Image (spheres, rainbow, N blue to C red):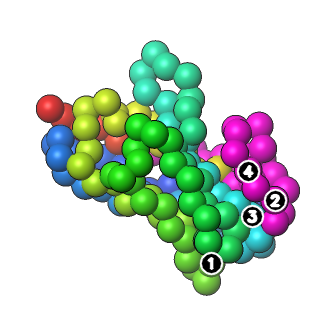
Amino acid sequence: QVQLVESGGGLVQAGGSLRLSCAVSGRSFSIYDMGWFRQAPGKEREFAGSISWRGRTTSYADSVKGRFTISRDNAKNTVYRQMNSLKPEDTAVYYCAAAADPRRPAVVAAEYGYWGQGTQVTVSS
């Protein structure tokens, strides 16, 4: 049974920072791309960033480039998302996801086979 558990969400003022964590169990974490998605109230879930299985390549949505950073610790089966200079429009439920196929890039939501339960991030103005 594959499980992804996010943590680190909460309430922060605009301009502040948060670090989200996603712990993965039940599979070989180190050979799968990991992604972060977010869903704001009344909006569809959107891609927010990803990291390759070796950690060599990261990609980010234009809306978060330069402010958010994704990293992973394969020894701890955990992926992180450092979020700086937060804005009210970053308010959303953030989900981590694990790629469905090993050692292959995962970009769109359909290429991710496992999802966490989500963690709420609220940025006040």
The reply to whether dot 4 and dot 2 touch (C-beta < 8 Å) is yes
CA gap between label 2 and label 1 equals 16 Å
Helix, strand or loop status at disc 2? loop
Amino acid under label 1? Asn
Report the disc number at residue 53.
none
Report the disc number at residue 74.
1
* Total numbered labels: 4
Say which of 60 and 43 sits in front.
60
The reply to whether dot 3 and dot 1 touch (C-beta < 8 Å) is no
Q: Upstream in the sequence, badge 1 or badge 4?
A: 1
Residue bearing mark 2 = 104
Helix, strand or loop status at disc 1? loop
CA gap between label 3 and label 2 equals 7 Å
Residue bearing mark 3 = 32
CA gap between label 3 and label 1 equals 10 Å
Residue bearing mark 4 = 106
Amino acid under label 2? Arg
Asked whether the viewer can see residue 54, the reply is yes
Residue at (42%, 60%) from the top-left corner?
69
Q: Position of residue 31 (x, y in %)?
A: 77, 71
Q: Nearer the viewer, mark 3 or mark 2?
A: 2
Q: Residue 76 is drawn in which quadrant? A: bottom right
Q: Is residue 55 left or right of residue 30?
A: left
